[in-house]
Image (cartoon, rainbow, N blue to C red):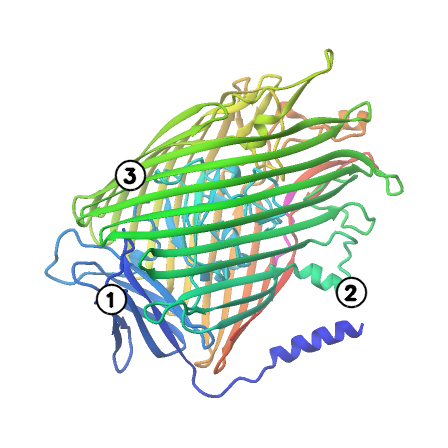
């Protein structure tokens, strides 16, 4: 009890830290670079808007600038450079404890203009990748916290965008336009990474807690269809995430307590040379909040079911050397939980059925080095090498009765290691044309051992292998600007997988026409291919008559898709935007199974692991089509809002060619969110943000109660798979935050009130073997989450 009192006393004392009465100021620093090549632009003018007297700076030979002694709060910049479109960066948030460091990309004008044209908020949503002209947008890391319910998680944040839905409150799986979450590509600093979520199974892309710490990320891209050729081995979309560099002049520190964990962060300069920009470091360590509190003696009523996890992220940036710019990044995460072994565990949860006890753990490690070398101001090479590992292990037992001895059911260890190399050459030939070529090579070494107990109460292997494989890719892409208003993109990607010796050629194209300064039309097409989750290729088939084991999936080919997209953008008023997109996707060569005719790999990601079916053939198909509308007001004058509506249909055909709903066919999603900033004094700010989502219910395969009662095991009625869906999903979240700037530190308190209405959305049904009846599990009810952050 004394520990608890000491804990809360310490926290309360921290909250009541005295705040200096002096005015607070901060520095805005950064660089101005060419949008295509990233080459620095010396002599660019940077102006602080609405400042009296006027405040500005000119970039030096490295393209760097600094504006010092700027009052804290919201500030905006205007950047000008001869021969380039001028740009406004609105509403940068300055706090007293942390310098704001920005990289500003300017677009070269195709035709020199007699008068200055400033493109301001039209740039807010524009993809950072200039090749992505449709179904792509950038987002700021501030949005991952500003949006209610996002909890600092970029995956939960993008669920607010049109075309995106989630099916599980306890996880952040992203369903893009009715596609499986397994079709998502994660990239971090140009390195393709495995599932970056704690408690994530191999081959999936989501989990309960994201390892990617939003305190370390920078503005990034999210792509949802017909994406450029440099994004490959993905069917649904791509997260292209960037890490920010640490402060290369001043040491800064962050402490945080919240939903994602107890966190400590540090950054600062590494002075490796006397002149020019210094190198910098950036690091953050996080540990599970519930595990820390559990160790302090707090009881959450969940018995031993306490999520244990920790992660470490770092970046070392060495800019401006004669050999080019180097970045070293690292990401490590480890997680473990056991469920259902203690009678005190929560009776109903979304992770394991009743009567089942599960121990699950996962690990991820990524180390990568990137190098950028400029041949001249118009051409450069970017090369990355990385080593990665990811693994998961599971132990599942049957505990049908509270007093029964656990009966072994399943044991699993799945591990994958990867060595990766990629290089890209990018060339700009004047303001009209830019092109790039790239190659990627991935070497995988895998180790799988899964065993299941069969009727004879003996373990039988479903997978037992150690093997290696290679995935090669190369691409070429070109963008031509006919003028400042009309641009054409074309590209092609080649993909070769040595395990089944398959080669795919994937053309991509898009056209964007800005027929005036406020309106534009876009069209896009992409052919996309994806390797199956690698564990699928090694699933063992059993010949029980001749007692022979063999693999039948080695020759399963890529799943493929055609994407067609059309879009309209209208900036009808300052800070207001209307966006409409419609799309059609045709998926083909989807693995299906003759003896299980309802099965299709198109539904992978419907639950927490992957199906391990043998005898798969590429004879399945699917199709998604839909209509999306976004009405958005960017943050200005202290408020913002985002309204999205998505109507879609997602169907598939299994081996029997019957057209069925996919597991992700919710048919509609509506999001409404917004927020307001109240400036109390020049040092204090109160923020209120809300979010409401209304979506079609989750598709399901119903429990066959008759057969389940006869066998006293959970059996599903696959003959009517995904015919029906549960009642509509509804949820409202509210976030209230308070920021205070001191002289040398800033503090923030926030509370996230999850599902404030307490609406009970149905998640799944199962079979209770002890009570011999069907039961239901609901999505998360009302749940408050707190955050405290201090920067100094």
Question: Of residues 233 and 733, which is closer to you in this image?
Answer: 233
Residue 541 point in image, percent of width and height: 65, 20
**How many numbered marks does the figure carry?**
3
The residue segment tinted magenta is 755-763
User: Extreme bottom residue here?
Assistant: 21
- Say which of marks 1 and 2 sits in front: 1
Q: Which mark is residue 477?
A: 3
Q: Residue at x 29, y 78 (%)?
A: 51
| Tag 2 secondary structure | loop
Which of marks 2 and 3 precedes in the sequence? 2
Residue where numbered disc 2 is placed: 297
Q: Quadrant of residue 627?
A: top left
Q: Residue at x 49, y 36 (%)?
A: 443
Q: Residue at x 66, y 28 (%)?
A: 463
Say few, some or many: other residues with alpha carbon within 10 Å of mark 2 (under 14 / 14 to 19 / 20 or more).
few
Residue where numbered disc 1 is placed: 61
* The magenta stretch spans residue 29: no
With 3 as the anchor, is 11 left or right in this view? left
* The magenta stretch spans residue 759: yes
Q: Is residue 618 positioned above or below 608 on the image?
A: above
Q: Residue at x 78, y 65 (%)?
A: 297
Which of marks 3 and 1 precedes in the sequence? 1
Say few, some or many: other residues with alpha carbon within 10 Å of mark 1 (under 14 / 14 to 19 / 20 or more).
few
């Amino acid at each position: 009890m004394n520990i608890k009192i000491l804990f809360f006393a310490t926290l309360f004392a921290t909250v009541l830290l005295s705040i200096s009465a002096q005015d607070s100021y901060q520095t805005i620093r950064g660089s101005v670079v060419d949008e295509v090549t990233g080459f620095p632009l010396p002599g660019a003018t940077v102006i602080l808007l609405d400042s009296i007297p006027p405040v500005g700076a000119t970039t030096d030979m490295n393209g760097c600038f600094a504006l010092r002694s700027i009052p804290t709060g919201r500030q905006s910049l205007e950047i000008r450079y001869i021969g380039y479109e001028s740009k406004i960066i609105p509403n940068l948030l300055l706090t007293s404890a942390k310098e704001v460091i920005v990289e500003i990309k300017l677009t070269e004008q195709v035709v020199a203009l007699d008068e200055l044209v400033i493109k301001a908020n039209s740039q807010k949503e524009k993809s950072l990748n200039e090749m992505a002209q449709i179904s792509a947008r950038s987002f700021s890391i501030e949005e991952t916290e500003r949006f209610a319910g996002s909890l600092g998680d970029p995956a939960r944040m993008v669920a607010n965008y049109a075309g995106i839905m989630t099916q599980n409150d306890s996880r952040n799986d992203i369903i893009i336009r009715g596609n499986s979450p397994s079709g998502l590509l994660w990239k971090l600093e140009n390195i393709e990474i495995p599932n970056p979520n704690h408690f994530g199974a191999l081959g999936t892309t989501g989990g309960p807690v994201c390892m990617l710490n939003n305190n370390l990320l920078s503005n990034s891209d999210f792509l949802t269809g017909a994406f450029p050729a440099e994004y490959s081995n993905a069917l649904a979309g791509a997260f292209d995430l960037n890490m920010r560099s640490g402060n290369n002049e001043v040491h800064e520190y962050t402490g945080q307590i919240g939903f994602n964990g107890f966190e400590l962060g540090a950054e600062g300069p590494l002075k490796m040379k006397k002149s020019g920009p210094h190198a910098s470091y950036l690091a953050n360590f996080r540990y599970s909040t519930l595990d820390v509190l559990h160790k302090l003696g707090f009881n959450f009523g969940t018995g031993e079911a306490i999520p244990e996890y920790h992660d470490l992220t770092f970046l070392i940036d060495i800019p401006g050397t004669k050999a080019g710019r180097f970045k070293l990044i690292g990401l490590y995460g480890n997680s473990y939980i056991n469920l259902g072994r203690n009678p005190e565990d929560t009776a109903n949860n979304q992770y394991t059925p009743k009567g089942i006890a599960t121990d699950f753990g996962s690990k991820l490690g990524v180390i990568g080095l990137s190098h950028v070398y400029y041949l001249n101001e118009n051409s450069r090479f970017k090369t990355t090498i990385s080593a990665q590992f990811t693994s998961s292990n599971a132990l599942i037992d049957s505990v049908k009765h509270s007093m029964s001895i656990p009966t072994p059911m399943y044991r699993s260890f799945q591990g994958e290691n990867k060595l990766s190399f990629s290089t890209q050459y990018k060339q700009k030939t004047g303001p009209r044309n830019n092109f790039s070529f790239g190659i990627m090579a991935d070497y995988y070494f895998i180790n799988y051992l899964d065993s299941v107990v069969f009727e004879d109460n003996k373990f039988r292997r479903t997978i037992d292998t150690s093997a290696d494989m290679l995935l090669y890719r190369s691409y070429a892409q070109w963008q031509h600007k006919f003028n400042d208003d009309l641009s054409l993109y074309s590209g092609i990607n080649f993909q070769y997988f040595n395990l089944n010796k398959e080669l795919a050629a994937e053309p991509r194209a898009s056209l964007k026409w800005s027929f005036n300064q406020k309106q534009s039309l876009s069209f896009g097409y992409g052919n996309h291919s994806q390797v199956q989750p690698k564990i699928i290729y090694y699933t063992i088939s059993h010949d029980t008559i001749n007692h022979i084991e063999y693999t039948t999936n080695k020759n399963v080919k890529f799943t493929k898709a055609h994407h067609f997209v059309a879009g309209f953008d209208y900036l009808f008023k300052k800070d207001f935007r209307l966006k409409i997109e419609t799309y059609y996707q045709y998926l083909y060569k989807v693995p299906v199974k003759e003896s299980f005719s309802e099965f299709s790999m198109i539904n992978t990601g419907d639950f927490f692991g992957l199906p391990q079916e043998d005898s798969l053939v590429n004879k399945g198909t699917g199709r998604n089509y839909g209509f999306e509308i976004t009405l958005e007001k960017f943050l200005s004058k202290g408020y913002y809002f985002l309204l999205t509506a998505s109507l879609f249909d997602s169907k598939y055909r299994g081996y029997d060619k019957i057209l069925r709903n996919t597991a992700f066919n919710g048919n509609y999603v509506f999001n409404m969110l917004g927020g307001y900033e109240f400036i109390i004094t020049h040092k204090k700010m109160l923020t209120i943000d809300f979010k409401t989502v209304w979506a079609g219910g989750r598709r399901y395969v119903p429990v066959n109660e008759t057969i389940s009662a006869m066998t006293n095991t959970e059996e599903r009625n696959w003959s009517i798979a995904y015919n029906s869906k549960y009642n509509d999903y509804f949820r409202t979240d509210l976030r209230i935050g308070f920021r205070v700037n001191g002289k040398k530190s800033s503090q923030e308190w926030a509370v996230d009130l999850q599902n404030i209405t307490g609406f009970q959305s149905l998640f799944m049904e199962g079979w209770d073997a002890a009570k011999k009846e069907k039961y239901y599990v609901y999505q998360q009810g009302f749940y408050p989450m707190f955050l405290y952050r201090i920067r100094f």
